[in-house]
Amino acid sequence: MGRPMIRTRCTIRRWFPLVLILAAGSALLAQEQKTEYSGEVLVASLSGDINTGSADYLMDAVEKAQKTERILIIELDTPGGTLKDTQELVKKMLSAKVPLVVFVTPKGAQAASAGTFITMAAHVAVMAPGSRIGAAHPVMMSMIPGGGGDKGKGKDKDQDAAKQRDYMMEKVTNDTVSFVVAVAKERGRNQEWAEKSVRESVSITSDVAVEENVVDLEAEDLADLLEKIDGREVKISEKTTVTLKTKGAAVVRQKMSLKQRLLNFLANPNILMILMALGALGVMIEFYHPGGIFPGVVGAICLLLAFTSMQILPVNWGGLLLLLVGIGLFTAEVYVTSYGLLGLGGAVCFLVGGIILVDPSAEPHYLDPTLSVDLSLLIPLVVVMAAICILIGYFVVRSQRSKIETGVEGMQGMVGAARSDISAEEGRVFVRGEHWKAVSTESIPAGSKIEVVRVEGLLLHVKKKG
């Protein structure tokens, strides 16, 4: 009995220090790791919609900040954008391993709709005085198409369509609410207000946002921001807390790539409408005057860019069809005598098509209800396009009706000189720099001025020019 006990005690004495070391190491690992972030600060600026190009730009900025171990500051001023692109960006931000700061700037800027999600997903959310945040309700079609009448099957069909639309609206809204509440919970922000911003489209100013724990603080500008967040502790993960050292830090700005700038440029309804109009005019001019080449090439390029824009924006295909019909009517105006009716119809189709061309209610659910072609651009564009088409048509008709001035047919009515006496049987004349055989029903002496009456092959019938 004694020997086993002795062996056990020896074993305990031998392994006890190792057990203590392992236990202490586990405790240390379980504690939060605290580090400092200092040095250069990476800044990405976005002013405009959240779309494929701009979201890709911000996600690239997050990647670069992680690779270079820098603090990333996103200067934001946006009316909203697509829910799909916003979700991808927010997922990237929530999983970031470096401190992210979103700064809604300059004064008067907004973080509306999609901007609300992005701002709340930051480790530190800052707003300039006078800026605003909120109104994050997804946009969907609220109008119910008619055509069913007030009774019978038509009425039942409209009611079913209304119920289906309400169901889809509720489904999208609930999903969006879950998304924004999850983001607010992850960053320790006001979850109740986050839900209201989606369900009730609530929007608040910067000072109220600070009071209600929607954002962390206000700052006048970037320099003020760097000073105010200096020394602030940010929780990157459950085990990692970092201290920001930003006072007087050097600023490095992230620029958009050429591809991102192009996609961001094309994600604009007004640009899409201009490209459609220029493309249509280029192709029409080439059609009126074949061989011009330049108008046709420019028109084709503009149409290709317009089709690329349609892959980014939520396009209503009914609006696109109206635009194409309008272009067809403009073209027909040149060849059909309609006293301007076809041109007027083309202008109406182009105007209505432009109004409904971009539909913010289409998938993947836009968070910017203002996304549409601006009427202040659309109306002058339609007027100018109609005027150009009418002007082109005028020149085409005039050229078709003008007198032929080339070839044998163009010699009728031309004036020349008699090089010999001219009779009903023979004579010679000089017309258009050439000598011709000529005959006349009257006797014309040499040296007289003559006028060509008609042409028969290489024989001119002339008369004396009085």
Image (tube, rainbow, N blue to C red):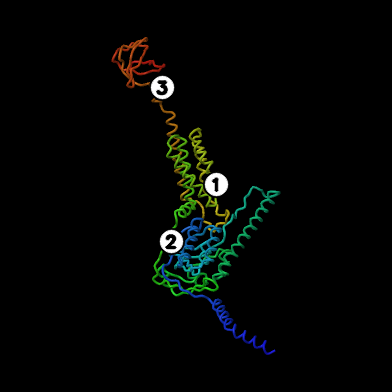
Please name the amino acid that badge 2 sits on. Gln
Percent from the top left, x then y, of residue 261? 45, 54
Please name the amino acid that badge 3 sits on. Glu
- What residue is drawn where x is 67% and y is 88%? 3
For mark 3, does the 10 Å Cα neighbourhood hold few (<14), some (14 to 19), or many (20 or more) residues? few
Percent from the top left, x then y, of residue 176? 59, 62
Up-down relation of residue 249 to residue 438 (above or below): below
Q: To which residue does mark 3 refer?
A: 409
Q: Secondary structure at mark 3?
A: helix
Q: Secondary structure at mark 2?
A: strand
Q: Quadrant of residue 447?
A: top left
Res 68 label: none
Q: Is residue 216 something that shows in the picture?
A: yes
Q: Nearer the viewer, mark 1 or mark 2?
A: 2
Q: Disc 2 to disc 3, how far (Cα)?
A: 69 Å
Q: Nearer the viewer, mark 2 or mark 3?
A: 2
Q: To which residue does mark 1 refer?
A: 319
Up-down relation of residue 359 to residue 457 (above or below): below
Q: Secondary structure at mark 1?
A: helix
Please name the amino acid that badge 1 sits on. Gly
Marks 3 and 2: in contact by CB < 8 Å? no
Percent from the top left, x then y, of residue 253? 42, 62
Up-down relation of residue 138 to residue 431 (above or below): below
Q: Give the residue furthest to the top.
A: 425
Q: How many marks?
A: 3
Q: To which residue does mark 2 refer?
A: 254
